[in-house]
Image (cartoon, grey):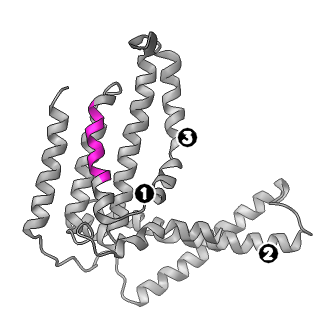
Amino acid sequence: MRDRIQELYALEQLSGGNSCVHRLHPTVKLLTTVFFIITVVSFDRYAFGRLIPYIFYPTLMMALSEIPYIMLLKRFLVTLPFCLFAGVTNVIFDNEPAFLIGGVAVSYGLVSLFTILFRTYLCVMALLVLISVTPFSEITKSMRRLKAPHIFIVIFEMTYRYIAVLFEEAYSMYIAYTLRSAGAKGIRIKDMGSFVGQLVLRSLDRAERVYNAMKCRGYALHNLPQSTRKLTHKDLIFLAVTCFLCAAFRCIVF
C-alpha cells in the first residue's frame, strides 16, 4: 500500500523538470489541455479516423518533456475496463455493417467501441501529461486565475491532498489487524464493517489535524496568493499553434 501511495504522487514529482514544456506558463498548459479535450469529445461515436491526427498532442508533449511513456500507459490502463464496459453494449446492439475488411463485415458497433477507447486514451493521456509537467499548486492557481468555481477548486485540492491520508490510515490499520488475527490473509467479511467505520473516523480526525496545521502556517481558502508570472511570446505561440491545429483537425473532413 505504501508503494501505491508513492505511485499516486509519482507523476507530480516529474513536474519539477526543466524541459521546454515544463517552462511553459501553467495557465497556457491548462487552457491547451482543456481545448484539446473539448475538441476530441466533440466528435461523434463513429469518427475514429478523424481522431487519429490528435495523437500529435500527447506524443509531442511526452517527447519534448521526456516523460516515461510506460508510466503514463499504466495509469491509462486503469480506465480501460470502464471504456470497455461502455463500448461493449454498442457492439451487441449496433450490429449494422459499416464496411468490409477482407470480406469480413465490420459493424458500426465495433467502430464505436474503438472510437470510445481511442478518445478516452487521448483525453486521459492529455490530463496525465498536464499533471506530469505542471506542479499541482500551479494548476490550482491557474484555475483561480481563470475564475473557476471556488468550491470546485477547494474540493479538488482537499481530495488530492487527503487521499494519501486515507491510504496511510488504511495501511496502519491493516498492519494492526493482521498482527491481531493470527496470520489471517486479508480482512474477514465479519470485520469489514467495523474496519471501514474506524478508517473513516481515523481519517477524518487526522485530516482535521492536518488542516489545522495548514491554517497555523498561513493557509487561507479565500486569501491565497495569486500567480505573478507573466505570459511570454513563447507561451502565446504554443497556445495559438496547438489550438489552431486542434480546430483545424476538427473542421477538416477526410
- Sequence order check, earlier mark of 1 and 3: 1
**Tag 3, which secondary structure?**
helix
Callout in the foreground (2, 1) = 1
Q: Residues within 10 Å of mark 3 (few under 14, many from 20)?
A: few
Q: Is residue 60 above or below residue 181?
A: above
Q: Can I make out residue 147 in this image?
A: no
- Identify whether 28 is placed above or below 41: below
Is disc 2 placed on a helix, strand or loop? helix
Locate the N terminus by quadrant: bottom right
Read off the magenta span. Answer: 50-59
Q: Earlier in the sequence, mark 2 or mark 3?
A: 3
Residue annotated with mark 3: 81
Q: Where is mark 2, residue-wise?
A: 176
Q: Earlier in the sequence, mark 2 or mark 1?
A: 1
Q: Nearer the viewer, mark 2 or mark 3?
A: 3
Label 1: which secondary element: helix
Q: Look at the numbered discs 1 and 3 and tell me whether their residues touch, using CB distance below 8 Å.
A: no
> Counting other residues with Cα less than 10 Å from the Cα at mark 1, is it few (<14), some (14-19), or many (20 or more)?
some
Left or right of 76, for residue 225: left
Measure how far apart labels 2 and 1 are at the Cα level: 37 Å
* Residue for badge 1: 69
